[in-house]
């Protein structure tokens, strides 16, 4: 990922927060026939290994787990809040006219070797932790144990586990840092008034 220093995020806690704010990641691996990508939710354990470990699962019918080259590095993309930025919001537009559109966004790219596995105990642990994560706070919280054991066993036979120990990580926070405080204030105000929820999310994190 092209990541100039002004946009680079290196704070571990901030990176963890960025990853956890992205509920759906994209797993990219290489195969003999080219790149393969699958969107999937992933569990991030930041205390495992040097940079943390990612856990998830794919459908057994998904050929990615069979075709991925064992010797190649996997890439997991976490695309966070993002928004189109119109030059109309810049104070400098009226002063010089020397402005162009851009896109503000948060993104984390994590790299590491991928392990695919079919052990039922490991799979049950992963799907339970993922479910608990996303059911937390819901009024009628569902647990894996709510379903009949034989049904869960059948579901586990239809998936393959994914484990990626992160070896390197690139995190980017592109939020108009190269613009003046006045221009950033204009962007923040413009996004805050947008009817789009994603725009309003970006407005909250624009530095002023």
Image: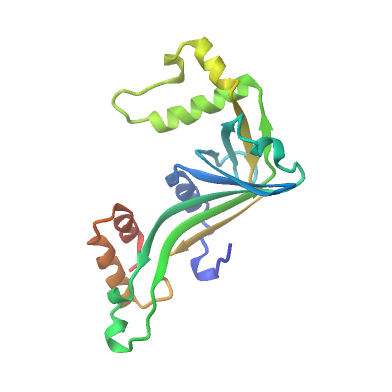
| Left or right side of 62 for 104 | left
- Quadrant of res 162: top right
- Looking at the picture, the colour scheme in use is rainbow
Examine the rendered structure and indicate whether residue 150 appears above or below residue 18.
above
Camera-nearest residue between 50 and 39: 39
Q: Is residue 58 visible?
A: yes
| Left or right side of 40 for 185 | left
* Residue 153 in the image, given as x and y percentages of width and height: 56, 15
Camera-nearest residue between 26 and 5: 26
- Name the residue at 67% across, 29% down: 117
Examine the rendered structure and indicate whether residue 117 appears above or below residue 31.
above
* Residue 191 in the image, given as x and y percentages of width and height: 28, 63
| Left or right side of 85 for 1 | right
Quick one: quadrant of the N terminus? bottom right
- Quadrant of res 188: bottom left
- Name the residue at 50% across, 28% down: 129
* Residue 32 in the image, given as x and y percentages of width and height: 75, 47
- Name the residue at 30% across, 83% down: 93
């Amino acid at each position: 990922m092209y990541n100039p220093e002004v946009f680079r995020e290196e704070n571990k806690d901030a990176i963890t927060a960025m990853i956890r704010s992205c509920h759906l990641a994209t797993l990219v691996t290489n195969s003999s026939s080219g790149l393969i990508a699958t969107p999937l939710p992933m569990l991030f354990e930041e205390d495992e290994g040097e940079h943390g470990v990612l856990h998830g699962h794919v459908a057994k019918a998904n050929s990615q787990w069979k075709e991925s080259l064992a010797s190649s590095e996997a890439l997991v993309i976490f695309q966070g809040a993002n928004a189109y930025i119109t030059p109309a919001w810049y104070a400098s537009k009226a002063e010089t006219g020397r402005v162009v559109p851009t896109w503000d966004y948060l993104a984390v790219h994590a790299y590491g070797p991928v392990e695919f596995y079919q052990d039922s105990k490991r799979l049950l642990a992963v799907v339970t932790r993922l479910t608990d994560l996303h059911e937390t706070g819901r009024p009628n919280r569902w647990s894996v144990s709510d379903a009949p054991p034989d049904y869960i066993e059948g579901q586990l036979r239809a998936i393959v586990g994914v484990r990626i120990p992160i070896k390197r990580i690139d995190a980017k926070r592109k939020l108009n840092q190269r613009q003046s405080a006045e221009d950033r204030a204009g962007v923040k105000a413009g996004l805050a008034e947008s009817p789009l929820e994603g725009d309003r999310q970006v407005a909250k994190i624009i530095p002023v």
